[in-house]
Image (cartoon, grey):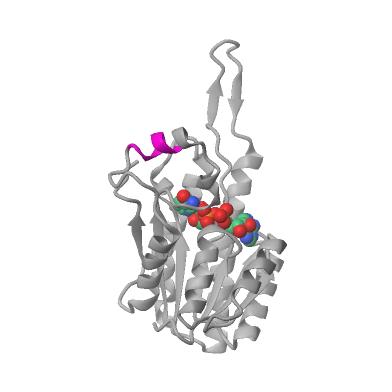
Amino acid sequence: MQLSGSKAIVTGGASGMGRHFVLSLAQAGANVAFCDVNADGITDLVAETKDLPGSVQGFECNVADEASVEAFVKAASEALGGLSILVNNAGIFRDGLLVKQDRETGAIKKMSLKKWQSVIDVDLTGPFLMTREFAANVIETKSGPAVIVNISSIARHGNRGQTNYSAAKAGLVADTRLWAIELARYGIRTGAIAPGFVDTPILQGMPEEVLKAMLKPVPLRRVGSTNEMWLAVKFIIECDYFTGRCIDVDGGLSI
Ligand SMILES: NC(=O)c1ccc[n+]([C@@H]2O[C@H](COP(=O)([O-])OP(=O)(O)OC[C@H]3O[C@@H](n4cnc5c(N)ncnc54)[C@H](O)[C@@H]3O)[C@@H](O)[C@H]2O)c1
C-alpha cells in the first residue's frame, strides 16, 4: 500500500513511538487521525503538524473503553473519508513479580488483580476493540485494501516482572496471525513489530547505570530509535505480500 493519500489511525499518538508514527505518516502524505488519553499531548502534536504534506487530527479516546473506541473510529472514518491503516500502538506497563517473599519477614506480596487487569485492558482489549471497529468500518464503507500494524514487544517471550505485559503482548502477536487469516478475504492485512528497548520518554527518565546494565545483553549495545521502529511499520504497510507475521526490532536481544 502506498503511504501517500492513505487514511491512517494511530492509537497512543501523543507520545513516544506513536508520536513519531503520526509525524512520519503525515510527512509521507498520509492523512492521519490519532487518539490518546493525554489531551495536552494531542493539542501539542496537532500544532506541530500544520505544515506537513498530510493532514493530522487528534481525538481523545481511551482504547480500553468500548463506547470511546466505537465513537473514535466512526469520527476518524468520517473525518478521513474512509480508513486504510490502523496502528495499534497505545500501551502501558505496570511491572511487578507474580509473588514475592520478603527475606526477613517471610511476608508474601502478590501482583494485584488491578495491576494485571489495567495492562490487559489497555494492551490487549484496546487492540481487540480498535481492530474490530476498524475492520467492520473498512468492510462496511468498502474502503479496503487496508492494513493493521500491532505494536507488541520483546516481552512477549515472557519477561521477568511482566506477567501482565508479557501476556498482553504475546496475545497481540497471536491475534495478528489470527486476524490475518480471518480478514484476508476483505482485503485486510496485518503485521506486528516487537521492539526491544526504544528511546522514548519511559527510558529517558532512567538512571544511566540502570540503562547501562539493561543494555549489556543487547548485541548492538544501544537502544533503538523511534525511527528504526517506524522503518519496520512502514515495511508492513508498503509490502502487500506481508501478513500475519511479527518483525523483531530489538538489536539482537534475546530474553
Ligand atoms: N519504549 C519501549 O522501549 C517499548 C518497547 C517495546 C514495546 N513498546 C510498546 O510500544 C508502544 C508505545 O510505547 P512508548 O514507549 O512510545 O510509550 P509512551 O508512554 O511514550 O506512549 C504511549 C502513549 O499511549 C497513550 N495511552 C496510554 N493508555 C492509553 C489508553 N487507554 N488509550 C489511549 N491512549 C493511551 C499514552 O498517553 C501515551 O501517549 C506501547 O504499546 C509499548 O508497550 C515500547
Q: Residue 247 vs residue 6: left or right?
A: left
Q: Position of residue 155 (x, y in %)?
A: 43, 46
Numbered-mark total: 0
Point out residue 130 in the picture as x, y percentages from the top left corner.
58, 68
Q: Name the outermost residue toward the top.
A: 104
Q: Nearer the viewer, residue 245 or 236?
A: 236
Task: Using the image, determine if residue 104 lies above or below residue 145.
Answer: above
Please name the predominant secondary structure of the magenta segment in the image: helix
Residue name at image x 45 percent, y 33 percent: 209
Quarter occupied by the N terminus: bottom left
Horizontal arrangement in the rendering, residue 235 relative to residue 150 (left or right)? left
Residue 24 shows in this picture: yes
Q: Quadrant of ligand 1?
A: bottom right
Q: Nearer the viewer, residue 34 or 53?
A: 53
* Residue 187 % position (x, y): 42, 82
Considering only vertical position in the picture, is 239 above or below 201?
below
**Stretch of the chain drawn in magenta:** 211-216
Residue 214: within the magenta? Answer: yes
Instruction: Name the residue rendered at 33%, 79% in the picture.
Output: 240
Of residues 238 and 145, the one nearer the viewer is 238
The residue drawn where x is 41% and y is 42% is: 158
What quarter of the picture does the C terminus occupy? top left
Quarter of the figure with residue 108: top right
User: In this view of the protein, can residue 169 be seen by the observer?
Assistant: no
Looking at the image, which is closer to me, 215 or 166?
Answer: 215
Q: In which quarter of the image is residue 34?
A: bottom right
